[in-house]
Image (tube, helix red, strand yellow):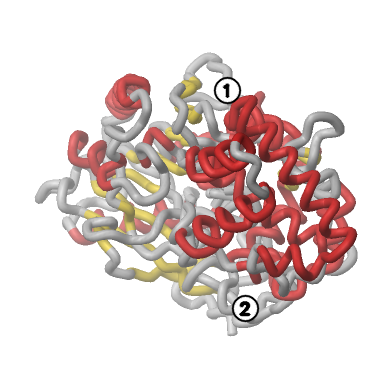
Amino acid sequence: MGSRARFASLLSASFLLLLLRSAEPLGLRQQTPLAGGELLGVAGRYLTREERWMNQRLDHFSPTDHRQFKQRYFEFLDYHGAAATGPVFLRICGESSCDGIPNDYLAVLAKKFGAAVVTPEHRYYGKSSPFQSLSTENLRFLSSKQALFDLAVFRQYYQETLNSRHNRSSGFENPWFVFGVSYAGALSAWFRLKFPHLTCGSLASSGVVLAVYNFTDFDKQVGESAGPECKAALQETTRLVDEQLQSDSHSVKALFGAQTLKNDGDFLFLLADAAATTFQYGNPDAVCSPLTNAKKNGKDLVKTYAQFVRDYYIKKLETTVSSYDQEYLKETTPDDSSSRLWWFQVCSEVAYFQVAPKNDSVRSAKVNTRYNLDLCKNVYGEGVYPDVFMTNLYYGGTSIAASKIVFTNGSQDPWRHASKQKSSKDMPSYLIKCSNCGHGTDLRGCPQLPFRIKGDSSNCTSPGAVDTVRKQITKHIDLWLSQCQEPTRLGSGMLSHPMTHERTVQ
């Protein structure tokens, strides 16, 4: 899930530079957020980018609507062996375009266990959109519940595909294990909750399983991760920006390269996200070093922060200012659809409103509940509202009543407060502690930006902390796979992939 619409764009080119902006909003602006996106490519960044396609049902909850859409997916079989009887690792792609299977620490795990890796793209994102127009009416089939059934149907479809390729009986079952980061991490946990017969277990890396209406703990963690000196500099910068907005809003926005943002709330959210991202993705010095030095030397804090936003957040991370513009979010055929899509999920299901706490806030107090509700209404119209009570009632929040799920979080990640941070029976939870351990550190290494091949942990301030948790993850996977190794025969009443006679969405 990231900080604003990244677990949407936590977790496109900037989660593909941010958990790509799209991880894995969210990474989540829910930076793409999340809760969720991957990071932009270097040589070897992907295990594969070869696209495959299946027919997916548009509405899993209607007995009469048989429309379909084309869902993109990827497969990597190099470690699976000729007989293809080993595990299948289902890596969930979250709130962003899914352009391949990342070559992060999951590749190490796949090689160790001789596993195939498959990744379906989330409905509506990337090339898997049922509709050309993303009108509010057409977005009514975009939800975590529909996405979970997509995963279940895909899982059955792919198992049948493997059986057909290898001339096996239709009842043969490989052992499956599910993985996800951020919002996709929540989907991983929820998949095990709702379809325990379809997976041996799940890894919910930075899995944001708790829908939160007023997510004040996000900002509190930003301040805690920053430390006293940097936090004070950020707070003073926020105060000065608020003052300058009152006297000359155009000039201060232009200083940040964000003069196109007419809504002050959109501008202030951009500024809050820029700082939060550094802690979320393991680059705290990017913001803290210039700000604390400027404060010590009596330099202009606003100009210093503006340079950080322009050079780091906008230029280096390729963040598009337009993704914070409500007028752009209203467009139904945008160039980058991930922001509009993730904000719809935020506004209709999970909220994660990253509002300023009443006291000691790092972000502007103007980034409040009213700002978020007005955005939802302005962008999607009347009637779109995040019923977080019902979302948590349906999935259980941090009281999720499931088994064989590993939860992991980085100590500096603001999103960890929407994850399950306490172990319970058959659901261990691990906190990876280091000064640059953030979103999805167990799979991505440090920093989480730029991309780390094989999830390299050598640049974590405590590589041992990361490696210790990885060893625990490996033990759980090994145990849970061993407990469901025996092939089983599924009854004819089980889920199957969509039939060929069903019609495709036009």
Q: Residue tagged by mark 2?
A: 334
Residue 184 x %, y %: 51, 47
Q: Is residue 417 left or right of residue 42?
A: right
How many discs appear?
Answer: 2
Residue 15 in the image, given as x and y percentages of width and height: 48, 58
Amino acid type, mark 1: Gln
Q: Which mark is residue 421?
A: 1
Residue drawn where x is 64% and y is 25% of the image: 228
- Which mark is on residue 208? none
Circle 2 Cα neighbour tier, 10 Å, few/some/many (<14 / 14–19 / ≥20): some
Question: Amino acid type of disc 2?
Answer: Pro
Which residue of the protein is positioned furthest toward the bottom in this rendering?
506
**Callout 2: SS:** loop
Q: Residue at x 64, y 30 (%)?
A: 221
- Residue at the image point whose x is 79% and y is 30% from the top: 360
Quarter holding residue 334: bottom right
Say which of 365 and 233 sits in front: 233
- Whether 78 is drawn above or below 112: the answer is below
Q: Is residue 416 above or below residue 46?
A: above
Quadrant of the image occupied by residue 294: top right
